[in-house]
Image (cartoon, rainbow, N blue to C red):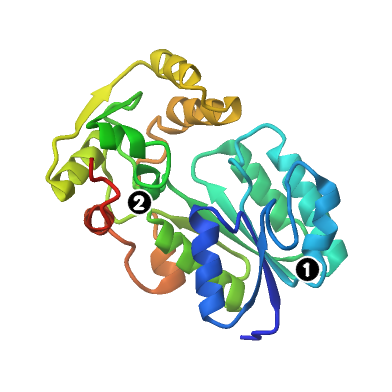
Amino acid sequence: MNTTTTTLVLGGTGKTGGRIVERLTARGVDVRVGSRSGEFPFDWTDRSTWAAALAGVRRVYVSYYPDLAIPGAVEAVTALSEAARAAGVERLVLLSGRGEEEAQAAERVVQESGLEWTIVRCAWFNQNFDENYLLEPILAGEVALPAGDVPEPFVDADDIADVAVAALTEDGHVGELYELTGPRLLTFAEAVAEIAKATGREIAFVPVPLDDYSAALEAEGLPSDIAWLIGYLFREVLDGRNASLADGVQRALGRAPKDFTDYARDAAATGVWTA
């Protein structure tokens, strides 16, 4: 590994990006955090920020905010790929979404960019329960979601970060598409039950109609693009298309992915779910 190679981590303060920055820094890699508040500011909506952020960079972790399913994301990834190639970037590692047609269109853009590439295609993150919008309802003791009995192979953000770091720092992952899932399927009700058990608290799961849920999000003042994305994920993606396991973690790292029970236990130990 060449520790003098500068790596740009887009979304470097987010759930996966922050973990990747920590791991790369621990390895002695020269890391540039790609965020609007970074030393080299990067803003997906302001392309005038891209050149400075990419200058001198050889490898880039591409995490599009808020999600590749958002309209305009594929065009933005296309423009970034072109800017990266012009700047002398050698390798792109793309964070993608499992079961999202738009995300897979962005994957094709990266694959056809002329650069070295690795795709990290992910299931629903475990950390949505403790680092995102599901934290508040868990603290309140009732999680109401438009999710029925369709299971999801929740994947841990630490596993995603480990795979991405391997792809950014090693040569054996170029040209690979890693589809990452956890080791088993759980419904959202089962996931909430796991969290209740880990915390020793009573946490109810209440299935609700999608229209009612969307209306509640709007009433809470959630940004419109985030509200749209959440509705899209429950309406389109959580329809059974992802109710299967994949072996991306095993292929990339040679070990099993983290189980949801272990995630719930570790998160509970931090006190994040203490009401």
**Quadrant position of the N terminus in the picture:** bottom right
Q: Position of residue 13 (x, y in %)?
A: 56, 56
* The quadrant where residue 30 appears: bottom right
Q: Position of residue 155 (x, y in %)?
A: 38, 53
Judging by the rendered image, the residue that carries numbered circle 1 is 89
Front residue of this view, candidates 103 and 127: 127
Q: Find numbered disc 2 in the image and state the secondary structure of the residue it sits on.
A: loop
Q: Is residue 249 above or below residue 145?
A: below
What kind of residue is marked 1?
Val
**Quadrant position of the C terminus in the picture:** top left
| Left or right relative to 200: residue 78 | right
Front residue of this view, candidates 92 and 31: 31
| Left or right relative to 66: residue 212 | left
| Left or right relative to 81: residue 8 | left
* The quadrant where residue 212 appears: top left
Mark 2 or 1, which is nearer the eye? 1
| Left or right relative to 225: residue 247 | left
Instruction: Please report contact status of discs 2 and 1: CB closer than 8 Å, yes or no.
Output: no
- Residue 188 visible in image: no
What residue is shown at x 67% (from left), y 54% (from top)? 35
What residue is shown at x 50% (from left), y 40% (from top)? 99
What residue is shown at x 39% (from left), y 60% (from top)? 247
Disc 2 packing (10 Å; few <14; some 14–19; many ≥20): some
Q: Could you tell which of marks 2 and 1 lies nearer the N-terminus?
A: 1
What residue is shown at x 34% (from left), y 54% (from top)? 182
Disc 1 packing (10 Å; few <14; some 14–19; many ≥20): many
- Residue 18 visible in image: yes
Judging by the rendered image, the residue that carries numbered circle 2 is 245
* The quadrant where residue 8 appears: bottom right
CA separation in Å, label 2 and label 1: 33 Å
